[in-house]
Amino acid sequence: MITTSVAEAASCLKQGLVLAYPTEAVWGLGCDPFNEAAFHEILRLKQRPIEKGVILLASNVNQVAHLLEALSPEMRTQVIDSWSNRAPTERATTWLLPAGEHIPHWIKGDHPKVAVRVTTHPLCVALCNAFNGFIVSTSANPAGLSPARSLQEATAYFQQSPNYLNGDLGLSREPSKIIDAQTGEIIRA
């Protein structure tokens, strides 16, 4: 299915299906992060090992506030500011945050932390809102290949599955940078 309806796309996620959708810079693959079967379908499509973990994408800080609780007040402010005070052309920031026991092990992979990004991309915001929570976000490409930057590239990579929410990419030219919120280590510059 290819749709431009956010409601249809959110329904796919709620039904345990995988969805390809445009993000700030590249196309992503997503699913309900608490649906293990859907998550394993993403790994199969990408030919990606579970140990690597994936990013969770949220539409607002409230959806991930519980993941910020273990941070110092100063770091919490820095993380929230990076998500909310970003120009549309500026590269997004994904933060590695302490993952409580409520984050499934398959999302974290072999890591004690979880990668989280609050997006300002209008279509992604609408999708997370319609889904009523954060979703999985990993680049739409088989391992070792460049991330899809169009619906045509995504469908060329994944011909049988998944479902597609068609729309425009954001204005960023690069995928998000990734920073560990507790150590300040830059994981992806």
Image (cartoon, helix red, strand yellow):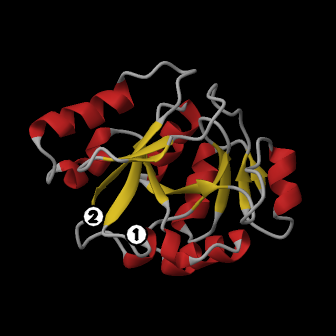
x, y percent for residue 16: 56, 72
Above-or-below relation of 16 to 71: below
Whether residue 133 is visible here, answered yes or no, is no
Give the residue at x 54% y 32%.
Answer: 121
User: Dot 2: few (<14), some (14–19), or many (≥20) neighbours within 10 Å?
Assistant: many
| Horizontal arrangement in the rendering, residue 170 relative to residue 180 (left or right) | right
The residue that label 2 is drawn on is 99
Residue type at tag 2: Ala
Residue 188 screen position, x and y as percent: 50, 46
Disc 1 is placed on an element classified as: helix
User: Does residue 178 appear left or right of residue 4 in this picture?
Assistant: left
Q: Which mark is residue 93?
A: none
Q: Give the vertical position of 110 relative to 1 (above or below).
A: below
Q: Are marks 1 and 2 in contact (CB under 8 Å)?
A: yes
How far apart marks 1 and 2 lie (CA) works out to 8 Å
Towards the viewer: 166 or 107:
107
Instruction: Judge from the rendering whether residue 41 lies leftward or rightward of residue 112; answer left or right.
Output: right
Crowding around mark 1 (Cα neighbors within 10 Å: few <14, some 14 to 19, many 20+) is many
Residue 57 shows in the view: yes
Pick the quarter of the image with the N terminus: bottom right
Q: Inspect the image, locate mark 1, and give the three-letter code of the amino acid beneath it.
A: Lys
Q: Which residue is drawn at 49% across and 40% down?
A: 177
Q: Nearer the viewer, residue 10 or 95?
A: 95
Number of marks drawn: 2
- Mark 1 — residue? 108
- Assign a secondary structure to mark 2: loop
List x then y, in percent, for residue 180: 33, 50
Q: In which quarter of the image is residue 81?
A: top left
